[in-house]
Amino acid sequence: MKINLSLIFCLLLLSQQASASTLSVFACEPEWAALATEIGGNTVDVTSATTSMQDPHQIQARPSLIAKMRQADFLICSGAELEVGWLPVLLQKSSNPKTQPGNNGYFMASDFVDMLDKPAKADRSEGDVHMAGNPHVHTSPANMLRVATVLTERLSALSPENKTLYENNHQHLVQSFADAMVKWQPAIQKLKNKKIVVYHHYWVYLEKWLQLQQVATLEPKPGLPPTSNHLSQLVNQMTNDKADLIVYATYNDSKPAEWLAAKTGIPMAAVPATVEDWKADNALLHWYETVINTLAKAIV
Amino acid sequence: MKKFLPLTFVLATNTSFADDISALKKEFEQLKTQYEKRIEALENQNTATQNTNQAQTNAFNPSISLILDGRFASYQNPPNQYHIPGFAMGEESGLASEGFAIGESELTASANVDQNFRGQMTASFGNDAGNTTTSIEEAFFETLSLGNGVTIRGGRFKSAVGYLNQQHAHAWDFADAPLVYRALWNSSYTDDGVRVSWVAPTDLFLEIGMEGFSGEHFPSGGNASSGAGAKVLFVNVGGDFDESQSWQAGISRYSASVDQRESATLTDTSSFTGDSDVSGLNAIYKWAPNGNYKERFFKLQTEYFHRDESGDVSLLTSGNKTTYKGTQDGFYLQGIYQFMPQWRTGLRYDALHSNNKGNDLVGSNVLSEADLTGQGINPKCISAMLEWDASEFSRIRLQFNHDQSYPNTDNQVTLQYTMSMGAHGAHTY
């Protein structure tokens, strides 16, 4: 047993050294997988722990993720307690010093943007609130670009020989966003000041960017599933002050939105909560475009 | 730019003046420059905003959580007569008090000690015949940065000998431990010692570990072998079948030199001295549509343990003694289904088997008084539960047991609450 173990150990150490030229990136959510791919290009080997069809609050700290974290050189997540139910287990069980808090390989995107929704007090009777603020920071391109800048610096520090490549990729990303902003103007103008009902308090950064007014949530409190009582209250609210659109994420149950839409005649839109195919070219731009176009099209 | 052209076209045909196209183009060019400037400005701000949010993430140091547990239990048989024929059990393996009673309230504090270590302690407050009992359920440190997948843990902790064994009682899917855990592990095996584990750098999860314990706590006993009486070896593997399905499987081996392990019986107290070996197998399968556990999920879990013991058993009151060769095994299989958010239901089947021998059967009946004769019974139990999890932090559970683990079949009903306050706990798989 002892001989076998040490043999395996040596082989594995060797195999590790062989693949040292690429950075292994563990992304908690697909948007960060997409960003790491945009900046890192083919010098990074990216894996995403979740998909756009999963609620990032409720992920299982499953064995495959521990195995991935064990091999990671770099960890990129939303942070702000979004992954509090599972990421700490992955960090503990993988015992990978590179991705532990405080090291260069530990990167929480929400550390680098201005957070919205910081609660005045921590009280769980208010639902699942995050003390650091709303963790869904990726829903605004401005946040994404801020994170991109810091990420470029961080990746350059970890892999100095690729600094120029990362900076070029970053420049390209910024330029493509600037181009897209112009292209999106008609949709952006159409959405301005529109009142929306959302499923979860998820889109605050997007709302700020597009100047959308969030007038209600389908969830009675953050993280709690919609109740019939709360939905009937929303019907009353909508009778007095009708919203323009009901928005829910594709991973949400569609029934509450459908019910409210049927009762009030308000159009609804299902949008992916994040990048669906992060391996695709321009995945981030494509996702923002999908969200904006879906919302703009749905509004009558 | 392709999608942009039809839009301009629509706009252009609406106004139907070619001049407007060039006007729009100009406007967009201006916007573009504006945005480029804004983005540039944003980038310049970056350095300023960099560490502003970081202090906050350390606001709870250490993170503290408190678990409240209580229940109303109703039994057909008197719970103090509970025993499982063929098994000498520890004191934590009986039934919970009848009627209203609080269970174990747990207070956990944990934090990174420094860049090298993490520490955690769980104190448990319970009730024993009207007296408040306090115990240190776990108190350990763990390394963070040894690298190469190696972790060392030292102190008092739950052994990795089984899947359920590593979970605190409040994380269980049923109000009580399965029969095989009650009969062999005193509901849960915790001891003082050290664990070294290694996770392989492969996409298939592979964990190999070894634990050395003092051997003080049931089913060990007496700090044998100069206080290094028990050791555990375990191997776990796991992975994903696809986006919706994941699995884990494990094998384990526990071996201990046991010195005077006492066990209360209905009439006396028995004491075992000798060698105890337990082999274990476990498998877990989880399914959720698209891997989204918010709405619905299913979890299938099974564990099997086989124990061989050889040595002597004596009775403390009478002083009678016998040689003892015990063979015992058992398993449980359980399924949990969350059929809608906040609502879960589960079924569990338990079974045990024992075949114990000694040289006294004709004479002094030590084995039968020590409750080590199976009495021709193959203990089994069927449990069903329904729970309402209003949030991640509260749970109300109703459980029914049809318990055939001893001669008089018992029907047990438990209504249990579990409330968690403080730091948001992270859940192991």
Image (cartoon, coloured by chain):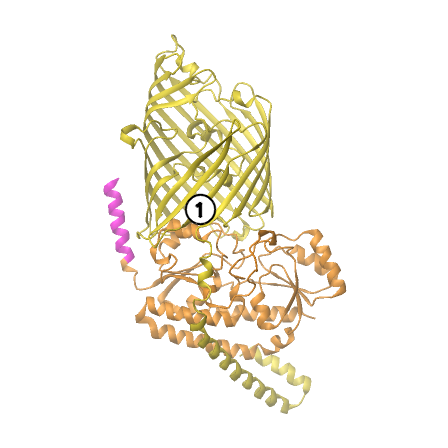
Residue at numbered disc 1:
B109
Residue range of the region highlighted in magenta in the rendering: A1-16
In the rendered structure, the colour chosen for chain A is orange
Q: Position of residue B174 (x, y in %)?
A: 53, 36
Q: Is residue A223 magenta?
A: no
Q: Residue furthest front?
A: B131
Residue B378 vs residue A88, the one in the foreground: A88
What chain letter is assigned to the residue under label 1?
Answer: B
Q: Is residue B80 left or right of residue A297?
A: left
Q: Residue at x 63, y 70 (%)?
A: A212
Q: Residue at x 44, y 70 (%)?
A: A148
Q: Is residue B194 above or below residue A24?
A: above
Q: Residue at x 37, y 72 (%)?
A: A166
Q: Residue furthest top?
A: B363
In the rendered structure, the colour chosen for chain B is yellow
State the SS at label 1: strand
Q: Quadrant of residue A103?
A: bottom left
Q: Is residue B204 visible?
A: no
